[in-house]
Amino acid sequence: MGEKTVRFRDGLKERLPLFVMLFFAVQPLLDAAGYWQARLGIPNAATLVLRMLLLGSAVLTGFFLTDRRKRYYVLFGVLAALTALHAAACVTAPGGYREPVADLVNLVRIWYLPLVTAALITCLRQNGKVWPAMLKGAACALALIAGIMLVSAVTGTDPHTYNYERFDRPHYGVLGWFLWTNSQSAVLSMLCPLAVLFAALKWPGRVLPAAAAAAVGEAALYFLAPRLAFAGLVLSGTVMAAGLAVSDRRRWKTALAVLLITAAFTACYPLSPTAQKEGYADRIGESLQEAQTESGVSISADPSEMSEEELDGLEDLYRGQNYVYSLVERFGRDRVFAAGPRLLYDDRVKKITFCRFLMEDAQPMTKLFGLSLQDMTYERIGGDGKPVTDNFDVENDFHGVFFLTGACGLALMLAFLLFFGLRALIAVIRRPKEYLTADMFAFAAAYGMALIHALFTASVLRRNNASVWLALVLAGLWYLSRARKEDAGA
């Protein structure tokens, strides 16, 4: 290695904390820019290119600095092999490979998580000050998101988390200048405990900073409105209060303040946008019941025991429920009716059922390495006689990873995610006095909420604005559970 290369490498190592902090702090600004691009009808090429440049810079930095390049070669090889085999499965599928560029871009979004995680681990190996820089970046991001939500609400530019035009009060929740509701829920659920941790470590003898971080993070989750956001509020507050108290008894005042803030938000649940929005689901059920009564068909009855006349009536009911009838056209009414009545009112079930049927009919290669993204669409003629394309891309991350990358992709993703959680758990079990710290509590809370969101929504593993934070969490769990711990400070 030449002298100039050595000097460049040493200089890069010294600046890693700043670069890492800025890498994370800029994420909400990219998200807000993406929102306004969509709102103003501007192509998202600029923010997409910038995100890819950040990804490429992070991976190249990690690869350049690492002393363990074989691990990168293995990672690159596995991802390249999965991509090639997925493409081969799509090419040999009966319908051919439709829109391969869009499909491969979607794969890159999934590969984003392991690539950024690997780069962050290398940065942590090279400079211990990267650890507090990661926490600082998370705290800055939380402050930016909360500020954007506040400004959007005050200026009347908030698009609202939920918009139900059918009812007398159609708007629920404060989303801010962000595009993806569930992604924001996942992001805030991960950032909240990390910001509280940063404040507690940065100002160890003071109660106000950690309490303020908890109040800001939990307020953002409270006003966002999804049920998982409210669950994140409760989990973050209680886990961090316990972590602060257990790790250091001198922090009991800080722990109590965080717990009281959480209790106050929890007590106000009946007034929250979350509770108000839940009334909408009840009204949807009432509308469906009215449609069922008018048709004279019981949606809960066993289709195999229905007469032909009753089946025709059920088919008419399905035809009237938005794009549910696309399933009937594509897969036949007997198969769709047997899937159960939840198809009539649960969009998530509709999409999972459509893709599940596709997988059941697919060739072995597709089952192993996934469907094309375009396979998850169906073209039909709408009620106005114009062509309509229904999108059945699923709303659950783990289902999405399975349908898009097959059984092999899902197995590798699960192994990757569980590795970090089990590694941390084993470290805590073996040496609880050393590893059961406030840091571990915070990252465990963030890790748990990320996986819960991935299980119930398409918000983390396939959305890079959220997977970037999961990468931070996984790298943090690796750092906290390493064999030789060094105090990096705050």
Image (cartoon, rainbow, N blue to C red):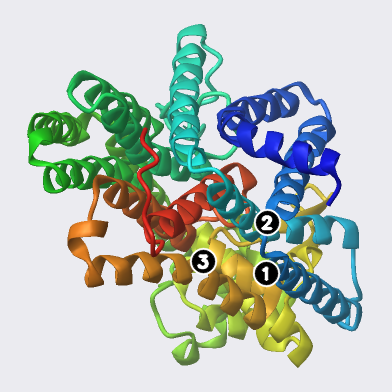
Quarter of the image with the C terminus is top left
Circle 2 crowding by C-alpha within 10 Å: few under 14, some 14–19, many from 20: some
Tag 2 near tag 3, CB within 8 Å: no
Measured in 3D between alpha carbons, the distance from the residue under mark 1 to the one under mark 3, in whole angstroms, is 39 Å
At x 43%, y 68%, the residue is 296
Outermost residue, front direction?
Answer: 3
Measured in 3D between alpha carbons, the distance from the residue under mark 2 to the one under mark 3, in whole angstroms, is 44 Å
Residue 251 left/right relative to 122: left
Outermost residue, top direction?
Answer: 155
Front residue of this view, candidates 265 and 130: 130
- For disc 2, the marked residue is 66
Q: Position of residue 482 (x, y in %)?
A: 41, 61
Marked residue nearer the N-terminal end (2 or 3): 2
Give the label on residue 349, or none: 3
Residue 194 left/right relative to 37: left
Tag 2 near tag 1, CB within 8 Å: yes
Marked residue nearer the N-terminal end (1 or 3): 1
Query: Relative to 44, is 183 above or below?
Result: below
Q: Secondary structure at mark 1?
A: helix
Going by the numbered disc 1, the residue's amino acid type is Arg
Quarter-of-image position of residue 115 = bottom right
Q: Residue 149: tell me if it is visible.
A: yes
Q: Position of residue 44 (x, y in %)?
A: 79, 33
Quarter-of-image position of residue 285 = bottom left
Measured in 3D between alpha carbons, the distance from the residue under mark 2 to the one under mark 1, in whole angstroms, is 9 Å
Give the label on residue 71, or none: 1
Residue 143 left/right relative to 397: left
Q: Residue 99: tell me if it is visible.
A: no
At x 73%, y 55%, the residue is 63
